[in-house]
């Protein structure tokens, strides 16, 4: 049995253990990390919290939410099943051309400048069935808007409603009532 260790220090990656598996009062140090991989979502970590030369893969989870401003991302840049919410702002400035929007489409307190130079979309050769992404000046970019992956739990007799980008939502279409102008 190990004696109770009374170390009055904090070790980011835990303490070293001796040959009996008992904790010592020495900090565990991660070895020098060199890796030739590029991992867009960061690296995996070992049991001590040290990076390994293996990429962190995002779980391919399907979320039934439709998020107008995208999904909250975790510490690895992977989408969670939680919507980004625009903060409520108390802007005290009045902007002649409206307020700027950030990359998520949320309003900021910065004023939209009248002479914003947007990308010349005639030079963009992409076909984007759901439109283009916009930047913080609300200008189209030469990047296609990506519809969020959603998995709706209810079947809709008349299909699902589409959002402003033409992407499916989980709301059902309702039939318009028929108005007949003659007796049958």
Image: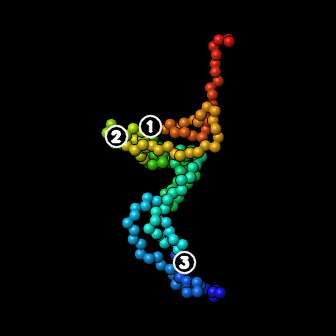
Whichever of labels 1 and 3 marks the residue nearer the N terminus, that label is 3
Residue in view at x 51 percent, y 81 percent? 27
Q: Quadrant of the C terminus?
A: top right
Q: Is residue 51 above or below residue 23?
A: above
Q: Residues within 10 Å of mark 3 (few under 14, many from 20)?
A: some
Nearer-the-camera pick, 82 or 156: 156
Residue 139 locus on image (x, y percent): 40, 42
Say what secondary structure mark 3 lies in: loop
Q: Which residue is mark 1?
A: 129
Residue situated furthest right in the rendering: 184
What residue is shown at x 53% (from left), y 53% (from top)? 60
Q: Earlier in the sequence, mark 1 or mark 2?
A: 2
Q: How many numbered marks, from 0 up?
A: 3
Residue 46's place in the image compared with 152, above or below, is below
Which residue matches tag 3? 14
What residue is shown at x 54% (from left), y 56% (from top)? 59
* Up/down of 138 relative to 22, above or below: above
- Left or right of 121 on screen, residue 46: right
- Of the 4 image quadrants, the one containing the N terminus is bottom right
The kind of secondary structure element at disc 2 is loop
Does any portion of residue 162 appear in the rendered image?
Answer: yes
Point out the residue furthest to the left here.
Answer: 123
| Residue under pointer 2 | 124
Q: Earlier in the sequence, mark 3 or mark 2?
A: 3
């Amino acid at each position: 049995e190990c004696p109770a260790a009374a170390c009055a220090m904090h070790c980011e990656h835990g303490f070293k253990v001796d040959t009996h598996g008992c904790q010592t009062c020495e900090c565990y140090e991660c070895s020098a990390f060199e890796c030739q991989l590029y991992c867009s979502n960061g690296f995996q970590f070992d049991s001590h919290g040290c990076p390994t030369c293996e990429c962190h893969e995002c779980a391919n989870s399907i979320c039934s939410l439709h998020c107008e401003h995208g999904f909250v991302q975790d510490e690895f840049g992977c989408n969670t099943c939680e919507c980004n919410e625009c903060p409520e702002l108390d802007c005290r400035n009045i902007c002649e051309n409206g307020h700027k929007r950030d990359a998520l489409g949320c309003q900021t307190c910065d004023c939209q400048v009248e002479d914003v130079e947007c990308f010349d979309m005639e030079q963009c050769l992409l076909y984007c069935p759901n439109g283009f992404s916009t930047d913080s000046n609300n200008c189209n970019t030469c990047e296609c808007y990506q519809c969020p992956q959603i998995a709706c739990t209810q079947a809709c007799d008349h299909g699902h409603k589409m959002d402003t980008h033409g992407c499916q939502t989980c709301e059902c279409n309702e039939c318009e009532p028929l108005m007949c102008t003659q007796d049958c």
